[in-house]
Amino acid sequence: MHELRFCHLDEVALLQSYIAKEWREDHIFVKSREVLDFQYLDRKNSRYNVLIAYNAQTKEFDGILGFSLLSQYDENIKDEWIFTSIWSVKKAYVSLGLKLYRYLFEFFNIKNTSTAGLSGISIKFSKLFYDKVGKLDHFYIKNDHKKNFKLAIFKQNPPTKKPNFKLNLKKLNFKEFKNSTLKCHFTPQKSKAYFINRYLKHPFYKYEALGVFEEDILKAVFFIRSVKTHKAKALLIVDFIGDVRGNLRTLFVEFLQKRRCEFASLLCYVPKKEYFLKMGFSLPSDDELLPVYYEPFLKQNVAIYFALTSKHKNASFFKGDSDQDRVNKLG
């Protein structure tokens, strides 16, 4: 009755129809073909990276499982990592959810994979396919020059450390990043072309490459974007490449002040939290509030659950992975 396969290029209307009926009529993938294409169109393989359960009788989709490959943003990357994302089945065919996942894992012989945004039953379900399930850490650096915060609630006042004068933060232009020789400290291993096409050439969001220099040598890059709501701004760090040791807090505070941002936040999972804590980032205490959602803005703490399977010791997940930093509304 059901054919499990990838969504064909000429089936985009069927895909959007399914999302409208089973998810939300005003879902961004329904309203914008361009947003849908950026997330799932696989030009290299001439398909949408959405596994579908096609009903031959009704000629409709009865279930979908979206996924992203690194090669969507760099065709020269070998796909050794898969990010899963949107997952839905019709109530009449609940068992399809398990079948879709099993098919995807067997088709790609998946050894390295991750996802985030899990809730309810999907958290329990993920334990069948993933080795690790937990909450993403939400690191932050607040702007110490500000006394009143509209978007967040801070109680901690980290001690000011003597700045490392060998380190410096500088925004990189396209050419500077392209000519760099940085490698990923964390897994999956993303190429420069991946970062360029995924972030710097994004059709909707304005991402920037914020370089960390040590005595004029580029050591690492944070990929950032600013968000503005309620007449206030925040800086979101969505990805990272390179490796740097040293406290960056003072540098970030000055950068936040120049940008008139209340704070910088970094939502991610890395094997050792100390890596970013030693850079000067903090983790929220129980009486602090650090928002996650901005489209629309939600002033509350929200735990973002993730799942991951990999034998790599530095396996990680950043906000820019999978669909966690995709556009939710236009204009």
Image (spheres, rainbow, N blue to C red):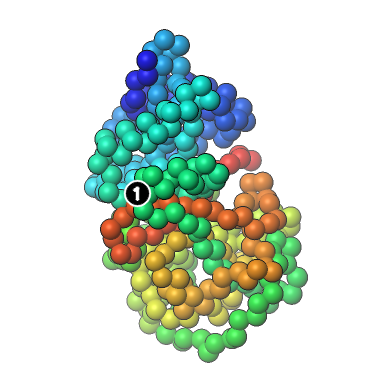
281 and 289: which one is in front? 289
Query: Residue 80: x and y, percent?
Result: 26, 49
Q: What is the secondary structure assignment of the residue under circle 1? A: strand
* Residue lying farthest to the bottom in this orientation: 162
* Residue lying farthest to the top in this orientation: 57
Q: What residue is drawn where x is 27% and y is 37%?
A: 106
Name above or below for residue 6 compared with residue 193. above
Query: Residue 28: x and y, percent?
Result: 57, 35
What amino acid does circle 1 point to? Thr
Name above or below for residue 127 compared with residue 175. above
Name above or below for residue 24 compared with residue 247. above
Query: Residue 251: x and y, percent?
Result: 53, 77
Residue 320 visible from this viewpoint:
no
Q: What residue is drawn where x is 48% and y is 45%?
A: 124
Q: What residue is drawn where x is 43% and y is 51%?
A: 307
* Callout count: 1
Is 36 displayed left or right of 230 in the figure? Answer: left
229 and 141: which one is in front? 141
Kindly indicate the quadrant of the structure image that contains residue 157. Answer: bottom right
Q: How crowded is mark 1: few (under 14 residues within 10 Å), some or many (20 or more)?
A: many
Residue identifier under label 1: 113
Q: What residue is drawn where x is 69% and y is 74%?
A: 155
Residue 183 visible from this viewpoint:
yes
Name above or below for residue 40 compared with residue 135. above
Quarter of the figure with the C terminus = top right
Query: Residue 92: x and y, percent?
Result: 51, 21
Quarter of the figure with the N terminus = top left
Is 163 displayed left or right of 294 in the figure? Answer: left
